[in-house]
Amino acid sequence: MNQPIESDTVYLVDDDAAVRDSISLLIETVGLNCRTYPSAEAFLAGLDAEIRGCLILDMRMEGMSGFELQEELNQRGCMLPTIFLSAHGDVPTTVRAMKAGAADFLTKPVDGALLLDRVQSALALAHARRQAQRVRQNARRRLESLTEREFEILKLATAGQPSPLRIDT
């Protein structure tokens, strides 16, 4: 489990070994990396701040539940798009997961083609989030490099005020 994290890695957390084996095999058949974990605690133990990809997460597990793991990831600022899997899916549970930031919610047994489609969507979302984060970091870096006077002029300009440097003729 200490191998380098790839950009298109699917992390699978499920306490059922047969589910982990079948889903990881399915994911690997389309050329994606899949790392499996038997519990939320095992996943958190190996969590890296630079983690990239998406997460397939079982709802009900021994120990920490899928909801509890998602809550912990949210608190840590982890931006992994999460696809919940549950054999006990209902509308209130799905709504709760989506409100907490899940990218999707599927019921077991899951159709392989549908799961792969949702994984591709989640990975695209992960890439978009990383790109947006890079844009924000670049903007922040540029703002921090402004002099005090440049920042004052920027604030006036963004407020729609005329530039104090304007010379009327």
Image (cartoon, rainbow, N blue to C red):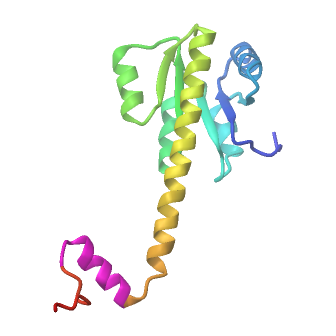
What residue is rendered at 36% in x and 33% in y? 99
Q: Which residues are magenta?
A: 149-161
Q: Quadrant of residue 157?
A: bottom left
Which residue is the extreme one toward the front? 169
As drawn, is 152 to the left or to the right of 74? left
Image quadrant holding the N terminus, namely: top right
What residue is rendered at 69% in x and 42% in y? 7
Total numbered labels? 0
Q: x and y percent of residue 113 in the render?
A: 61, 11
Q: x and y percent of residue 43 in the render?
A: 67, 38
Q: Is residue 69 visible?
A: no
In reply to whether residue 168 is colored magenta, the answer given is no
What residue is rendered at 37% in x and 85% in y? 150
Nearest the viewer among 3 and 46 is 3
Nearest the viewer among 93 and 168 is 168
As drawn, is 110 to the left or to the right of 132? right
What residue is rendered at 47% in x and 60% in y? 136
Placement of 50 over or under 145, stated as above or below:
above
In reply to whether residue 156 is colored magenta, the answer given is yes
Nearest the viewer among 12 and 126 is 126
Q: Quadrant of residue 153?
A: bottom left
Placement of 155 over or under 41, stated as above or below:
below
Q: x and y percent of residue 14 in the render?
A: 65, 23
Q: Is residue 150 visible?
A: yes
The main secondary structure of the magenta stretch is helix
Q: x and y percent of residue 169 in the render?
A: 16, 92
